[in-house]
Amino acid sequence: MSAAKDAAKGTDSAAWLLSAQAVRERAHALLADAERGKLDHFELKPKRLADAADLVAQVTREAYPDLAVPYHSRWRHFVVLGVDRWAALAGKLDPAIGGDPDEMARIRFDLAVTSVLLDAGAGERWRYLDSGGTVLARSEGLAIASFDLFRSGAFSDDPAHPLRTDTMALARLGADTLARGFQVTEDNPLVGLEGRAALLRRLGAALASAPALFGHPGRVGNLYDVLKGQAEGGKLPATAILDAVLRGLGPIWPGRIELEGVNLGDVWRHSAVGLVPFHKLSQWLSYSLVEPLEEAGIRVTGLDRLTGLPEYRNGGLLVDTGVLVPKDKRILEKPLEVGDEAVVEWRALTVALLDRIADAVRDRLGVPAEDFPLAKVLQGGTWTAGRVIARRLRPDGGPPIRIRSDGTVF
């Protein structure tokens, strides 16, 4: 029996699949099969891991010579051309708000959740022109477009308090609102526009249906108070953040695989192991909520119990450095569906190999794991290295494997 099939023995439970532990275990089970040459879609070239780690260490030192690397989170994308848009906005807030660490954390939760949920791949043609005349694309463009929408009060039902995300405003959010905010035209198309709007409307419904997490009327920022209440001695495990995100936001994902009456979200099937969880957006959102919590005085522990993010920059790094070699060249030639087994395999191997790259990068940088968690390796890091090598290899800087996106994955 293969390592992956052996790992899949027994009955999956929804509770287990909705955990970072499940993401890591299933990913490493598939990696074990890759090491035995037993996977159908990718061949593993372990000797090339050194090349990938060298590139990651190089770009990390270039970007952060003092190795003071922040966490990989949505907050990084709010800094454009050296200007931190969030810091500038926070500095202009009424002192009654800016001087209240709890309310500041709630606002940051409101912003982070909506911005992350709007971050799925934009497509190669979309651009955003900000108020300063800067043309932005991809993650930076999506970040600033969503930031500007949030700042305008598009997600708040209370004109007196525009900087919030609540159920009533989300319930009536249409694709036309997003189209205006994201400057979508026939010549500037955004992939998955309708899917993004539907996702935010489902977020509004989720807020209303879970008052224990989001209060009444539902507001995203109230999740901060729930997590603050779970902290013991001023400390909160990172898995508690992910658990709250998966419980509170699970209903928003389009109908995919359900188990025990639970919508599993970013979970897919692979013939070698069965159900393979990723929870990419949920984990990235969890990383993005760490800073608001820590700035409010709550120390987040156990960050490395979360996993690396199986998205096209990290996964592209592994393909472009030759660590993962597609066995069928058509994987590189035609767009694939998110649920295609080759995509599931690619994403799972990305999660597992990021753990190995992280260890190699720490060795090269001479930093201990406790001071340089995976969230910093990603930021330093693998995501940037994936972008760098993509630009070297392809004029448009796009990923080596193209995915058809519905606006809710990648």
Image (tube, rainbow, N blue to C red):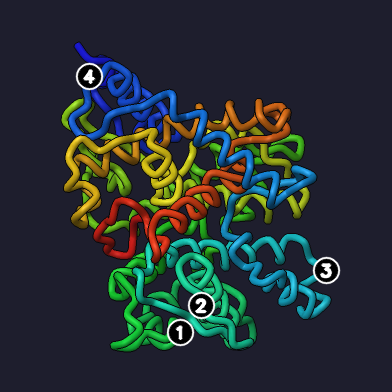
Q: Position of residue 236 (x, y in %)?
A: 66, 39
Q: Which residue is mark 4?
A: 5
Q: Which residue is mark 1?
A: 181
Is 219 in front, or is 345? 345
Task: Inspect the image, locate mark 1, and give the three-letter code of the amino acid beneath it.
Answer: Gly
State the SS at label 3.
Answer: loop
Q: Is residue 219 left or right of residue 373?
A: left
Among numbered discs 1 and 2, the one appearing first in the sequence: 2
Q: Is residue 400 above or below residue 220?
A: above
Label 4 to label 2: alpha-carbon separation? 44 Å
Q: Position of residue 133 (x, y in %)?
A: 59, 88
Task: Inspect the image, locate mark 4, and give the three-letter code of the amino acid beneath it.
Answer: Lys
Among numbered discs 4 and 2, the one appearing first in the sequence: 4
State the SS at label 4.
Answer: helix
Q: Which mark is residue 99?
A: 3
Which circle, 4 or 3, is nearer the viewer? Answer: 4
Q: Which mark is residue 145?
A: 2
Which circle, 1 or 3, is nearer the viewer? Answer: 1
User: In which quadrant is the N terminus drawn?
Assistant: top left
Among numbered discs 4 and 1, the one appearing first in the sequence: 4
Label 2 to label 3: alpha-carbon separation? 27 Å
Q: Is residue 235 left or right of residue 10?
A: right
